[in-house]
Amino acid sequence: MKSSLTLISLIILYIIFIQFNSINLAVCKENKIEYLSNLGKDKPIKIGVVWSFELEKKSNYFKDGILLAVKELNSNKFLDRKIEVIFRDDKNDIDEAQKIANEFVQDRSVVAVIAHNNIDLAMQTSITYEYGGTIMLSPAISYIKFTSINFDYIFRNIPTDMTITQELASFANFMNFKKIVVLSSNSLNSDSLTNIFIENAVNNNLEIIYDYKFKNNQKDFIKILTNISPKINHEMDYDAIFIMDNEENIINLIKNARKYGIYAPFITATILNHNRLLEEGEELDGTIITSVYNPFILNQKMQLFIENFQKEYNLSPNSWSAQGYDAIMLLAKSIKTSDTLDPSMIIQQLKYMRNFNSIFGKYSLNSKGDVIDRKIFFKIIKNKKFKYFNFN
C-alpha cells in the first residue's frame, strides 16, 4: 500500500475486522492471559519481531540490535528466565503482516511483538494485537495518529512526528533560517507534518515565503524548481527549504535542484535518516536531517552499547540498531517491574513508565503509549559523511 490509512478508515476497518475475522480474538486474549500468568519458570519469555528484513541491503542492523539486547539480558539473568525471539519477515506486504499477526495472537506463549517499519502494516495489524491481548511495540512508526484510538496494548519507543517536526522548526530558528520555502506532497502524512512545521515555524517568528504542495508520487519537479530557482526567479530569496515526501522523491528533487542553481540547505524529518543516503552523491551535501540517534552523545549507556555492538558484529550500529535494542530493554523493564508475564498487567507498567534509563537517556511513556522527553538530534551531510549539530 502506498498511502497511509486515515483515522476514519482505520476505525471502519477494525469494526469490519472484528465482525468478520474468523479468529475469536477475545478467546485468544483470555487464553493468553491465563497461560502466561501461570507459565513455569523453566519456560522462556517469547517476543515476536516483525520487520521487512528483505529490504535490508547490506546488514540487518535492526535484528542485530535486538539480538544484542537479548544476549545481554539472558547473560545477566535479568528476568530470571531466558528471552526467546521469534523473527518474521512481513515482506512489506499487508496480507503477510496480517497472517503473522494472527499467528502471534493465537500463540499463547508470545507476550509481546515488536513491529513494523511500514505505517499501513502497523495500523492494520494493531487491531489484531489489541483485541488479541498481545503487546505491540513499534520502534519505527512515528505517525501521529498511530496511537490516536487510545488502544491499551499498542506502544512505541520513537518520538511522534509532531515532536520531531516541532523540534525541526526550533532548529531552523537556531540556524537563523528566517525565510523558508516549504515543499511537500499532498499525501496524508506529508500534509500533516508540513502543517505542524509551518505552525511551529511561525511561532518561532520564521517566514514561510513559498508553500507548494505537489501530487503524491509526482516525479516531475521542473515547475517547482523553476519557481524557486534564484537563477530564474530573481525575486526569490530564502535561507532553507523544508521538504516532505517519500524518500525517493526527496532525493530526486534535491539532486535536480542543484541543476537549477539551488544550493540552499534542504531540511527534512527522519525519513532520510540512514547511511544509504551518503551513497547518493555530492548533490546531497548540505541536506539537514532529523534523527532519534546520536552516537556522539556523552551517555555512558550509549557508549557501552556502541562498544558492545562493534565487538559483536565488527561494525558500528545505526539508529535502527539502537531502536531495536531499546525496544527489547523497554519490554524487559516493564516485565520485570510488573513481576508477571500477564500482558494485561505489563501494559500498566508501560503506560506509566517514568524515567526509563535507556541508551538514549531517561524518557517516559504516557497513557496513549507515546514516548515523551526523548531528545531529537540533527545532522548534515558533508563530503558523504554525517556531521551532528550541537543542539539542545
Image (cartoon, rainbow, N blue to C red):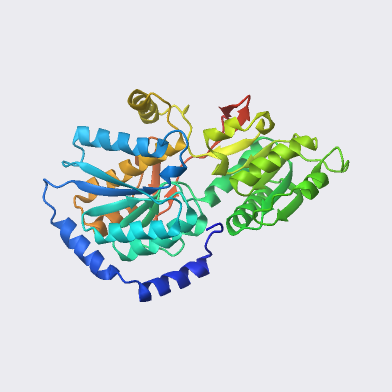
Q: Closest to the observer: 60 or 157?
A: 60
On screen, 142 above or below 74?
A: below
Which residue is at a point 53% across and 64% down the rendered structure image?
A: 6
Residue at left offset 47%, top offset 37%: 57
* Towards the viewer: 208 or 58: 58
- Going by the image, does 5 lie left or right of 211? left
Relative placement, left or right, of 106 versus 193 is left
Locate residue 112, reporting x and y percent. 29, 52
Toward which corner of the image does residue 252 lie, by quadrant?
top right
- Return the residue nearer the eye: 291 or 106: 106
Q: Position of residue 209 (x, y in %)?
A: 78, 48
Residue 48 visible to the viewer: yes
Q: Which residue is at a point 70% across and 43% down the rendered structure image?
A: 253
Image x and y of residue 297, in percent: 46, 29
Q: Quadrant of residue 2?
A: bottom right
- Residue 352 at least partly seen: no
Note whether 302 is above or below 140 in the view shown. Answer: above
Image x and y of residue 281, in percent: 65, 30
Q: Please give the count of numbered marks on the rendered protein.
A: 0
